[in-house]
Amino acid sequence: MAEQQVFATKGNLILYKKALKLAALGYELLDRKRNILIRELMSLVDKAGELRGSIEDTYKEAYSALQLANISMGLVTPYANCIPVETGVEIRTRSVMGVELPKVTLKERPLKVTYGFSQTDSQLDRAYLAFEKVKQTTAVLAEVENSIYRLSVAIKKTQRRANALQNIIIPRNERIVKFITDSLEEKDREEFSRMKVIKAAKLKSAQK
């Protein structure tokens, strides 16, 4: 056993008591961190559920508008090619208990129609606006789902570390502290008994 390989000295007793105290504190901090991360995760899971429902409706609305535009105008691909690729995505981060979570935003810019109106109708305008809404909702959902993934990974790591402290390191240090304490107490009792024997022998010798 590990505790049998440790020398029962007062120095080691102080050392392992300190290690035990630090391990207990570490477990307390990890447990607190885990609870905070779980609360953050739960709030995002609820938000993701709401977003998935709304994004499904948003996509359905956008593709329905696109289908109507194709019906009324023929294929709208040439007009779609006039719309510039979105380059205004910004990704920053925020820290929650040391876990970096993304913050995804689209740069605000004035809505600018890049296709002509002479050969288009309102159905294409509706489709264009609907897909603008899709971009915004998709950016928010990407932020939330990526945050959920990062939090899940962090919670698992925190749980493993907390379990190692609770189930391995703390019990081992407790056994070592007990082993050293018991050994030192036994040495003290032996020393006390030895001193009593010596004292008794001296008294007996003095009386002769």
Image (cartoon, rainbow, N blue to C red):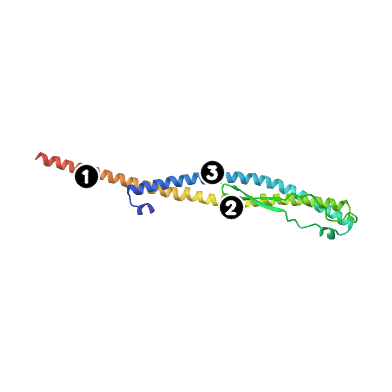
Secondary structure under badge 2? helix
> As shown in the figure, which amino acid type bears the numbered disc 1?
Arg
Q: Mark 1 points at which residue?
A: 194
Which of disc 1 and disc 2 is earlier in sequence? 2
> As shown in the figure, which amino acid type bears the numbered disc 3?
Arg
User: CA gap, disc 2 to disc 1?
Assistant: 60 Å
**Furthest-left residue in view?**
208
Left or right for 127, reference 13: right
Image quadrant containing the C terminus: top left
Secondary structure under badge 3? helix
Which of disc 3 and disc 2 is earlier in sequence? 3
- Measured as percent of width and height from the top left, residue 9 is found at 32, 49
- Measured as percent of width and height from the top left, residue 47 is found at 68, 45
Packing grade of label 2 (10 A; few <14, some 14-19, many >=20) is: few
Instruction: Determine the residue positioned at 62% across, 46% down.
Output: 41
Instruction: Determine the residue positioned at 56% across, 44% down.
Output: 35
- Measured as percent of width and height from the top left, residue 149 is found at 62, 52
> As shown in the figure, which amino acid type bears the numbered disc 2?
Val
Packing grade of label 3 (10 A; few <14, some 14-19, many >=20) is: few
